[in-house]
Image (cartoon, coloured by chain):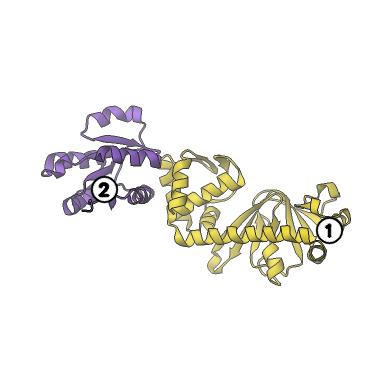
Chain colours: A purple, B yellow
Amino acid sequence: MTKTPLRILVVDDTFTNRFLLRELIKKSGYEYMEAEDGKQGIEVMLNERPDLVLLDIEMPVMNGFETLAYIRTQMDAPLNQIPIIAITAHDPNIFKEEFQSHEFDALLTKPFSSEKIISLINQICA
Amino acid sequence: MILGHNINQFNLPFSSLLKKSELQELFDKSNLVKYNAKETVLKQGTRTSHLMLIKEGMVKIYKENRNDRNQILRLSKKNDFIGMTSIFGAESFHFSASSVERTEIWFIDFDVFKNILLRNSKYAIKMLELLSEENLFTTDRLLGQIAKQLPGRIADVLLYFSEDIYHSTKFTIPLTRRELAELAGTTKESFIRTLTEFKNDKIINIKGSSFDIQSMDIIKTLHNLG
């Protein structure tokens, strides 16, 4: 029986990031879906029920922290327990404390490397 | 402005394949012209009579289209010929060229050059190789512009400067944002927006016209994924 590929949602307002992540995720054999802000991301989650979310922090309409809080407190199981990787261009040393106070599963800091992205996704989804 | 010059300054590529008399003949029928930045070197439609060779500086080769929309085909630098394809393939130049910085160019009489190619097959083969390289480069670039999305095209431009022109991850580009957009085959607004995204994502750092590629891995990934 063929295994269903993992379904990954990327929520990022930057086209370059979505483009890069889309190509890398698809190339790694995963299914890709995207949203441009947190509000759109929540809608995609409800409709598509992905297995993993890559969530940018700085976004218009609804930022990454607000989106995470909504997912963890307002959504029903199992969506409220979905693994979420935070994406940020903030200095990881400065951002670490803020990151730890939220319920993210991992942190991906910019600049990315294609290897780092895929290895983190594989690690979280293992 | 025509300058006084001597044969030691004549930087003709592969000149070791020429007889001394052939090199002298070419030199005698050439003259050196000096340009300031942003001067027209040749205008699209001009009749072909001279082959050009860059002694110093940099020249943008561009196609003039309707509505003042230009497309930059390439940047030519020291030791590059200009106009090889038009010289052999047409009666007039199919593109324009202008200096992007202070530039010196040899204008070589085409009839003399052609006669030497007829006599010297080894040199003629080298010129065919140069022509083929130029055609492959242009084809790849233009096909890339058709097939690739914006981040891939902008990554191509940054890689072009980093690897082909300056051989460094840090460089200062003597072109305006509009010219860079013309090189990437996009609008100035889209080019600036994508550059800003690259900067925000720490892929590059920009200060005016100075660029620093901070994540070559991502630039190459974008270039390859297109």
- Name the disc covering residue B26, or none: 1
Q: Secondary structure at mark 2?
A: strand
Chain letter of disc 1 in the image: B
Q: Is residue A74 above or below residue B71?
A: above
Relative side of A51 to B115, left or right: left
The image position of residue B173, as x and y in percent, is: 58, 46
Q: Which mark is residue B131?
A: none
For the residue carrying disc 2, how many other residues have a C-alpha within 10 Å: few (<14), some (14-19), or many (20+)?
many
Comparing A53 with B59, the one in front is A53
User: In the image as oriented, which residue stretches furthest toward the bottom?
Assistant: B91
Compared with B218, B182 (above or below) is below
- Which residue is at 35% across, 41% downward? A117
Q: Secondary structure at mark 1?
A: helix
In the rendered image, which quarter contains the C terminus of chain B?
bottom left
Question: Which residue is identified by label 2?
Answer: A8
Q: Amino acid at mark 1?
A: Leu
- Spatial CA distance of label 1 from label 2 is 64 Å
The answer to whether residue B184 of the structure is visible from this angle is yes
A38 or B69: nearer the viewer = A38
Q: Chain of mark 2?
A: A
Q: Is residue B192 visible?
A: no
Q: Quadrant of residue A85?
A: top left
